[in-house]
Amino acid sequence: MAINASLSAKDLSEIDAQLAATDELLERNYPGDDGTRQPVHTVYVPADRFTPGFAADWCAQALAAADAHGGLERLGALLGQDPELAHAVATRVAAKLGSEPIEDLRLDFEDGYGDRGDAAEDAAAATAADAVAAAVADGSAPPFIGIRFKCFEAPTRARGLRTLDLFVSGLAATGELPAGLVLTLPKVTTVAQVRAMDYAVSRLEEIHSLPAGRLRFEVQVETPQLILGPDGTSPVAQLPHAVPGRISALHYGTYDYSASLQISAEYQSMEHPVADYAKEVMQLAVAGTGIRLSDGSTNVIPVGDGVLDAWRLHGRLVRRSLERGYYQGWDLHPAQLPSRFAATYAFYRQGLPAAAARLRNYVERIEGSVMDEPATARALAGFVLRGIQCGAAGAEEVRQLTGLGLPQLTTLAHPRLAQPADSHNR
């Protein structure tokens, strides 16, 4: 028996009108991930120590540390990898360290630099801009590079803004800004500070004739006031909507945040319960917004007699972050690069066979032991795509396992990228 729909065109039009604001909110504030590469780590260095040869020097130090302790395969075994996996990972880590030892580099004018007086910091900011421009020009710069300046609290606000201004203006004077330019705003406590940063970079865009939105920035979550505000709400959840499209990432600050909650130094860690709570709030705050997340760092450095224990700790923490959806973290020393990439590559290579099989079954509509829905297929494709982007797996290797090339994989992981621009109005 045929059944006629009861709702009229007028009814449907009324519902559309009621949901117009919701449609606009979802389109504007929840665009999803843009599909571009996210670095697996951020390396911090005092700003005055950067030269165009910095990445090559860290590569040499990282390889020397690995060689001095039995090589990269032994490191893999130390991190719990079986011989076959350790060999595959070591081969790729060696290639990675030789070609791209640092994915994301931040020249630090904040805690890692300190207060050296205005004249010294003015000169250092100008020198940093010149050095970054030179490194980009000669191909020695990491794919992502930028500065962390001082925070917007009253005592350091003017200094932070001046350093930001001098650095960006110096880069603009040399020509086109680096494609992977990143600016980091630390110790944020209120939404107003982020709005002020939005104003500052908007003015710099106007002054230097840059496209609107060109200067995006990261927000460091280092204060409890950003997780829970005085009115009982979460300011960090308001940030994506206060300045839509301007924030590129939230970075968790392990030690400032822990100290703010009076956690004793011995127990300050990326895996302390207060850290997990803050990061869970951060994840909820930016879900669907396209803003990425980074975990913090461990200050236990692989040097002296403690190298092996420090590598075990670092490798375990890297793996822990990855399993919890934090695909980026901080590294503070060249000897952390081997354990960063070894743990990261093992994570993707261990998960690749099952993820590839499930993706192939999903695409080819083959029934398997797991019935995956579109959302899970997106997650599987995103996992595999991240593995390719960081070097843990090769595109051809993945194609053989899944039957999918990079374009298909990207479309599966980020379906909105393949939709027509006006599809939300149809």
Image (cartoon, rainbow, N blue to C red):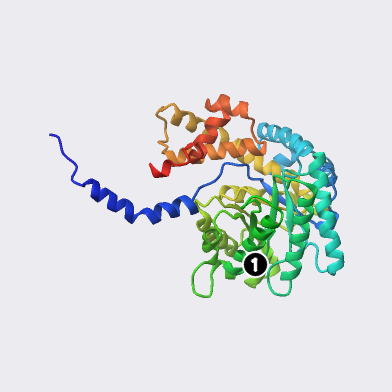
What percent of the width, then of the height, locates residue 301?
77, 55
**What residue is disc 1 on?**
258
Give the residue drawn at x 54%, y 58%. Answer: 240
What percent of the width, then of the height, locates residue 326?
59, 50
What percent of the width, then of the height, locates residue 330?
70, 53
Give the residue drawn at x 19%, y 42%. Answer: 5
Give the residue drawn at x 48%, y 28%. Answer: 360
Residue 72 drawn above or below residue 210:
above
In which quadrant of the rendered view does residue 296 lie?
bottom right
Q: Is residue 116 shown to the viewer in this render?
A: no
Q: How many marks?
A: 1
Question: Are there few (<14), some (14-19), or many (20+) residues within 10 Å of tag 1?
Answer: many
Q: Is residue 91 left or right of residue 379?
A: right
What percent of the width, then of the height, locates residue 307?
79, 50
Q: Specify the quadrant that holds the N terminus.
A: top left
Residue 75 drawn above or below residue 282:
above
Q: Specify the quadrant that holds the C terminus.
A: top left
Out of 199 and 94, give the one closest to the viewer: 199
Out of 373 and 27, give the one closest to the viewer: 27
Q: Is residue 213 left or right of residue 58?
A: left
Query: For the residue labelled by badge 1, is the local secondary structure a helix, a strand or a loop?
Result: helix
Q: Amino acid at mark 1?
A: Ser
Residue 13 drawn above or below residue 227:
above
